[in-house]
């Protein structure tokens, strides 16, 4: 019989503070969602120009403390079909970026979507959680 010890996990709660240094976002309060396959970040403007191979986004809403109005331009991005919480499929542009959570940094895909009507500007999905995080909803 072969015994494989469990990888040490970092325990986080149902919400957590995250940093996205490459996107100049610090101390963002995010919702942990074990049902979401990937991380998602709120963008008030999302434009894909396939001819120029460019993704242009403006993060957050003008009312947000995190809003700068700066348009971020990405030449390396992917478009994935994701299922939203209502079960509808939608194309979502995603970029690989560094996310710091609980003092640990990882490169993961983060998708951009309009989260205007939602409480949290970011969801932390399984693609980040599976890298060594355990969720304790009582925290």
Image (cartoon, helix red, strand yellow):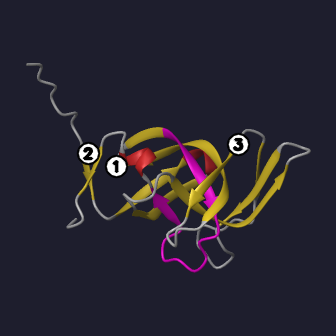
Query: Which is more foreground, mark 2 or mark 1?
Result: 2
Residue furthest top as drawn: 1
The numbered mark, 2 or 3, whose residue comes first in the sequence reads 2
Judged left or right of residue 92, residue 35 is left
Number of other residues with Cα within 10 Å of mark 2, as a class: few under 14, some 14 to 19, many 20 or more: some
> Which image quarter holds the C terminus?
bottom left
Judged left or right of residue 111, residue 5 is left
Residue 37 drawn above or below residue 86: above
Please, what secondary structure does the residue beneath circle 2 have? strand
Residue nearest the observer in this picture, 52 or 27: 52
Residue 131 drawn above or below residue 110: above
Q: Residue 77 carries which label?
A: 3
Judged left or right of residue 44, residue 115 is left
Residue 80 picture location, percent across and down: 64, 49
CA gap between label 2 and label 3 equals 29 Å
Residue 120 picture location, percent across and down: 48, 71
* Contact between labelled residues 1 and 2, with CB atoms less than 8 Å apart: yes
Please, what secondary structure does the residue beneath circle 3 have? loop
Judged left or right of residue 9, residue 56 is right
Q: Which residue is labeled 2 in the image?
A: 10
Q: Residue 48 carries which label?
A: none
Number of other residues with Cα within 10 Å of mark 3, as a class: few under 14, some 14 to 19, many 20 or more: some
Number of other residues with Cα within 10 Å of mark 1, as a class: few under 14, some 14 to 19, many 20 or more: few
Q: Residue 102 carries which label?
A: 1
Inspect the magenta stretch and tell me whether residue 16 lies in it.
no
């Amino acid at each position: 019989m072969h015994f494989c010890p469990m990888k040490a996990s970092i325990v986080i709660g149902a919400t957590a503070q995250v940093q996205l240094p490459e996107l100049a976002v610090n101390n963002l309060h995010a919702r942990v969602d074990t049902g979401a396959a990937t991380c998602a970040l709120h963008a008030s403007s999302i434009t894909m120009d396939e001819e120029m191979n460019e993704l242009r986004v403006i993060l957050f809403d003008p009312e947000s403390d995190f809003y700068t109005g700066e348009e971020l331009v990405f030449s390396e991005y992917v478009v994935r079909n994701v299922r939203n919480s209502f079960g509808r499929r939608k194309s979502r542009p995603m970029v690989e970026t560094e996310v710091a959570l609980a003092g640990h940094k990882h490169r993961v895909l983060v998708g951009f979507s309009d989260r205007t009507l939602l409480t949290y500007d970011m969801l932390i999905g399984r693609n980040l959680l599976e890298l060594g995080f355990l969720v304790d909803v009582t925290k």
